[in-house]
Image (cartoon, helix red, strand yellow):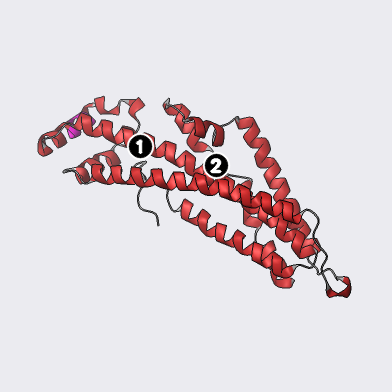
Amino acid sequence: MTDLCTALNKKWHIVRILSDVPCEAPKRLLARGLSIPPDLQREAFSNVGEYMIRKKFSYSLASVFLIAAVSGCAGLSVKGGIAPPVPGAEAKLQEANLALDAVNEQSSAFYAELASVLLEIKEFQDRAGWSDFERILLDYPSLRDPDTEAEKAPAIMSRLSEWGLEWNTSWENALSRYHQLVDRCIILDAKRLAVREKLLVVQAGYLSVVLAEATSGHEKEGKEIFAVVEALDKTNAELDSYQPNDLGLYGPGR
């Protein structure tokens, strides 16, 4: 019992993350005037007020689970050495499994789109002159935002024109294509954050089942379900390894 309770108490990071899941990507979509996909409207940008209520509820719920784990994991004695069935645990487990299935579908869709975007980015960066064009983008951060029209500044216009002449290509087309890819990465990152948030909620659901099993003397069952929580930690870490770089473009995961 002690091992399982110790493991439960180490899951405070889920409470902290649930209380502060970022939703900046959808805000950037509106700021850029981009069209928000219907699924993203539902999953990542559906009513900011509702998001805050859900966030607060998730924090409180996870806190209750783990505070109870601290106080209730001292080890409850079970008469006759046989642990009775846990009321509602099976239903909670089924609910968590269904939620995980839904997140898996959403995650698969994210990775499929990510693969497509990474391919497009690679094709763009494999073009002649990319390293020099990248240097211009790094030297003039304002170029990364199409709304600033930074390319009209004399110094920037001169650099871009020189690049176009040197590589015999249109800097206007290159910059436009770059902005298109940045827009796709912004939308994709919002989807990543939506998947990540749902995974954390699923973890909280499994933790509630683990707690119910632990406090009812079902340590073996609790450990088996806790293994799912730990596996989802790795899934979250993998999701976090894919984030836009300083140029706003996705690159290979860490």
Question: Which residue is located at x 39 percent, y 39 percent?
Answer: 185
Q: Nearer the viewer, residue 41 or 91?
A: 91
Q: Nearer the viewer, residue 179 or 42?
A: 42
Name the chief secondary structure element in magenta.
helix
Element assignment for label 1: helix
Which numbered disc flags the more N-terminal residue, 1 or 2?
A: 2
> Which amino acid type corresponds to the residue marked 1 in the rendered image?
Val
Element assignment for label 2: loop
Residue 15 visible? The answer is no
* 205 on left or right of 126: right
Label 1 crowd (10 A; few <14 / some 14-19 / many >=20): many
Q: Nearer the viewer, residue 119 or 83?
A: 83
Identify the magenta region.
155-160
Q: Are marks 1 and 2 in contact (CB under 8 Å)?
A: no
User: Looking at the picture, does residue 108 appear above or below residue 150?
Assistant: below
- Separation (CA) of disc 1 from disc 2: 19 Å
> Which amino acid type corresponds to the residue marked 2 in the rendered image?
Pro
Which mark is on residue 203?
none
Membership of 159 in magenta stretch:
yes
Q: Which residue is mark 1?
A: 182
Residue 250: x and y, percent? Answer: 37, 46
Question: Which residue is located at x 68 percent, y 36 percent?
Answer: 53
Residue furthest out toward the bottom: 81
Residue 157: x and y, percent? Answer: 20, 29
Quadrant, the C terminus: bottom left
Membership of 214 in magenta stretch:
no
* 45 on left or right of 141: right
Residue 87: x and y, percent? Answer: 81, 56
Q: Which residue is mark 2?
A: 22
Image quarter of residue 186? top left
